[in-house]
Amino acid sequence: MNTPAETVYETTISHIGAYENKRVELRGWLYNKRSSGKIVFVILRDGTGIAQCVASQKDVGEQLFAWLNRLNQESSLIVQGIVRKDSRAPGGYEVGLTGCTIVSEALDDYPISLKQHGVEFLLDNRHLWMRTPRQRDILMIRAEIVKACRDFLHSEGFVNVDAPILTPSACEGTTTLFSAKYFGEQAYLSQSGQLYNEAAIMSLGKVYCFGPAFRAEKSKTRRHLTEFWMVEPEAAFMRFEEMLGLEERMVCYIIESVLDNCESQLREIGRDPRQLINIKPPFPRITYTEAVEMLTQKGIAITWGEDFGAPHETEIASEYSKPVFVTHYPTKIKAFYMQPAPDNPETVLGADLLAPEGYGEIIGGGERIYDYNLLLERLKEHNLPLEEYVWYLDLRKYGAVPHSGFGMGIERVLAWICGLEHVRETIPFPRMINRLRP
Amino acid sequence: MNTPAETVYETTISHIGAYENKRVELRGWLYNKRSSGKIVFVILRDGTGIAQCVASQKDVGEQLFAWLNRLNQESSLIVQGIVRKDSRAPGGYEVGLTGCTIVSEALDDYPISLKQHGVEFLLDNRHLWMRTPRQRDILMIRAEIVKACRDFLHSEGFVNVDAPILTPSACEGTTTLFSAKYFGEQAYLSQSGQLYNEAAIMSLGKVYCFGPAFRAEKSKTRRHLTEFWMVEPEAAFMRFEEMLGLEERMVCYIIESVLDNCESQLREIGRDPRQLINIKPPFPRITYTEAVEMLTQKGIAITWGEDFGAPHETEIASEYSKPVFVTHYPTKIKAFYMQPAPDNPETVLGADLLAPEGYGEIIGGGERIYDYNLLLERLKEHNLPLEEYVWYLDLRKYGAVPHSGFGMGIERVLAWICGLEHVRETIPFPRMINRLRP
């Protein structure tokens, strides 16, 4: 059946395969162009993909042909043309241009040309840098991970609650807190919704918060942003072992979703999906004490009781091809709310999940203290202002239950899944020391 | 088939209907109890629902029976018992208790008793208040609305991007901004992700951000929180009319999701679902000018060019049983980025969506200026610091396209859907002037 040339299908590049030999209208931006005599190849991107459009002087007329030849990168266009199967074209189809409206001609000084640029320059132009295919692919994978977290937690019966950002007190100390003025009072930007989640589970059983978290990280590292997103599930009656199982299932669900829905993006950014397909339960588990022994045997100086740094984490993770749980850290180096292990109260029922390939901690979690007196003691040991924790102590006065939870940093997981060198590419507008713009 | 009494099914209250005549184990909190001689009714809540458990001295023994009779509200319990159909019980089933472990006895001074309390007292005890069935229901409906927004936008091809919270400049003026110290520099907490979305659409076509927004609202009103959550879709090439259609579809999708999945919660909080079932497209549309005429005819003093206050909005909305679009506001009272209407540039292609029943504006949106020179002019007219908008102006230099977007406040929508008097019940931990705790 022939479609009359007059019928024009408005569509997006992601869908042109459905319109073979039909006339479509696409709206997007000029990503690149190549001329060869009587033909110009217009490479169009529209947010859903990239399409090669071919214009011949014969088909589009002399005036439009000349115009296309002059057009600057990033000019916005509405093009019409016939979709043709062509195995050489990206996506397997090309569009034989029959018409084109130029919505807005880009000025000729577009800063992000198709050559290499320095990192600071790219970050200064993040609003334009994000248009490049690699950055777009990473942002698509980020969105998939966020969706996968929510879908997974919903399927497990967790209810989304939004923890507050403006808080009067610190969850884990005040040294890395951003402060804000709140009607004459001092407020802080939240580093974690955990304490609030612990209240919410007494109402809803299983909850998670998912929002921005803030850390006034003064050092420049490839793993830290000052503003990042974190998903934090917490459940009443969930014990430590159950929690590790939940973490495993969630990470595997995320990997599966990305492989199912973003394989082309992974390939385009140069990440081999085979590095991810074997990420399946169970994940290896070692205790902190075993990890210290392992490091010592490798000739790395560490004493029991010291916290791990990035090099230690990388060394431990390098032994495994899957994420590895490091459990039972010393009580003294972990947060005040961690439940002591019954068989060795110098260690806690807490675990960090370390990603392979040197990506370090992607999840931290554990069972929380639910005994009132022990929690009170810990708050005092940590010199925390008791008056700010009255409500948190209340949770141990009225119907305390064993409970656990964890926090997963989205940017760290994304960096690992995409195989990125630096977290600055993992968020639309990264915030770091000296970087608050654009 | 008889299940042997020894088989115990661990489940939640929401699922007990599947275990009729079987022995289940439930874990939760004592919500209430009633004694009548040789029987005690233990009303258990577990986050998924409320169940009536009946204990007779004969079945549970003298010691446990006495213990149950003494137990304080909010004590945490693990109960075992046989599920029996009983139309008089909440949910249609009751549990004949056979055993009970008390996890933690609540102290007898639990502040939120089952009688009435003052609002400030409830807010001071928000961490406990949220356990009451009404607050739990509202939080469940909130989670449903958040999920519906994301599901809807995903089905329409929108990609989730996270706009930054820490920003150097203000979207709509600085008078209601919270400031934060950022490594010696002044930063502000974002009021909207819109400007960042406008950059992201040039990469991804259709995007939305969904995060906390901040407004240093100094007045106490029943519609304002200082920290609230907002979903903000934005799309390249989307014109004003298309955007109104998108808003309509999204609001209706949310209503449908809540009616499908939270009807029992609506009923429990006293909201008649019939007030919502007729919220279907199309929504009525009137221009600002028509609205002014309507108000004048009703004897309400207003001059063309004045902004509407809450009483005006209530009056306009009272004419309709569905949300109503008020369009084409005067340019002078709207934000600098709003596209002038082609037939009357003294007005803008912007619309507020006003909810029925006096709930006021739930959505604000419009088409954005995409002409470089007009935007520059507007920035100057509004005395905004040009150096902070260089990147935003860039979006009009390189491939500008017509585009539109809107922002929907989750708490306002939730308040309307639930029929709440005040937004303070719409968020787990409300932030208002003088309210930063718990």
Image (spheres, coloured by chain):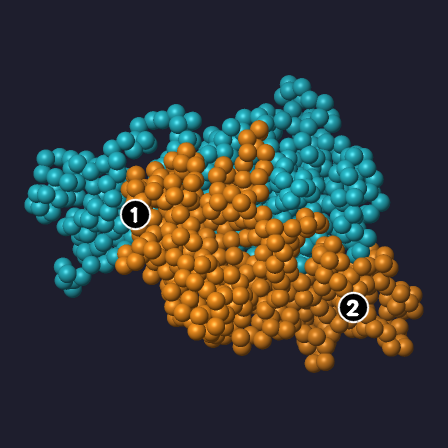
Chain colours: A orange, B cyan
Q: Residue at x 43, y 63 (%)?
A: A303
Looking at the image, is A16 positioned above or below residue B143?
A: below
The answer for which chain carries disc 2 is: A
Extreme residue in the bottom direction: A87
Figure quadrant of the C terminus of chain B: top left
Figure quadrant of the N terminus of chain B: bottom left
**Looking at the picture, which amino acid does disc 1 mark?**
Val
- Residue B276 placement (x, y as % from top left): 48, 40
Q: Secondary structure at mark 1?
A: loop
Given residues B254 and A300, the one toward you in this image is A300
Q: Secondary structure at mark 2?
A: loop
Given residues B334 and A355, the one toward you in this image is A355
**Residue A126 found in image quarter:** bottom right
Q: Residue at x 19, y 35 (%)?
A: B34
Looking at the image, is A92 positioned above or below residue B178?
A: below
- The residue identified by callout 2 is A115
Q: Is residue A143 visible?
A: no
**Residue B366 found in image quarter:** top right
| 2 and 1 marks in contact (CB < 8 Å) | no
- The residue identified by callout 1 is A401
Q: Residue at x 74, y 54 (%)?
A: A124
Image position of A57 (left or right of A261) = right
Rounded to the nearest angstrom, the CA distance separating label 2 from label 1 is 58 Å
